[in-house]
Amino acid sequence: MRMTTKVPLIIFEDGLKGSTHVRFRGRIVETSEMIYKDLKKREKQGELLVLDINEFRASSVCFECHQRNLRHHTAQERAFYNILICNDCNIFWNRDVLAAKNMMFISTQLWPGNERSDIFSRPTGQRAT
């Protein structure tokens, strides 16, 4: 019988690295750099694994069909920017849930050493801001 140990995988969006603080409801709650350093320390101790990924297009590509054909939900002449609708699948997405699902998808590509899908890749020569 083979014993396996489960180790948590933490996906850290690399835009947060080096941040001096994160605001939550108007308050500074913790520095992202401190959190990242603590995660890396725990990774060295074998408690978890940290995978850094770039979030490029994570909230602008439909998780179901992998197309960039999303629009903002509108109702009563108001746009809801946290709700997106895929024009191909007609699926409603919460922007944060969509980003999290796509970051997990990107992670499953990167973890075994593969390249990220073209739809999530920054065009050559374009810098991250």
Image (cartoon, helix red, strand yellow):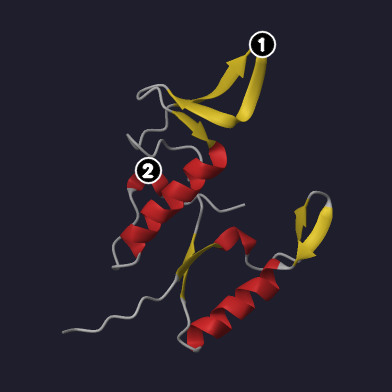
Q: Residue at x 45, y 86 (%)?
A: 46
Q: Position of residue 92 (x, y in %)?
A: 47, 28
Q: Where is residue 25 in the image (x, y as percent from the top left)?
A: 79, 49
Q: In this view, does 31 lie to the left or right of 14?
A: right
Q: Residue at x 49, y 87 (%)?
A: 44
Residue 49 shows in the view? yes
Q: Is mark 1 on a helix, strand or loop?
A: loop
Dot 2 surroundings within 10 Å: few (below 14), some, or many (20 or more)?
A: some
Q: Mark 2 or mark 1, which is nearer to you?
A: 1
Q: Which of marks 2 and 1 is nearer the N terminus?
A: 1
> Which amino acid type is marked by label 1?
Glu
Q: Which of 49 and 8 is in front in this view?
A: 8
Q: Classify 60 as above or below 36.
A: above
Q: Residue at x 52, y 29 (%)?
A: 84
Q: Where is residue 96 in the image (x, y as percent from the top left)?
A: 56, 43
Find the distance from the CA under tag 2 to the CA under tag 1.
31 Å
Q: Is mark 2 on a helix, strand or loop?
A: helix
Q: In which quarter of the image is residue 113?
A: bottom left
- Extreme top residue here? 76
Q: Quadrant of the N terminus?
A: bottom left
Q: Name the residue under label 2.
A: 119
- Extreme left residue here? 1
Q: Classify 44 as above or below 65.
A: below
Q: Which mark is residue 77?
A: 1
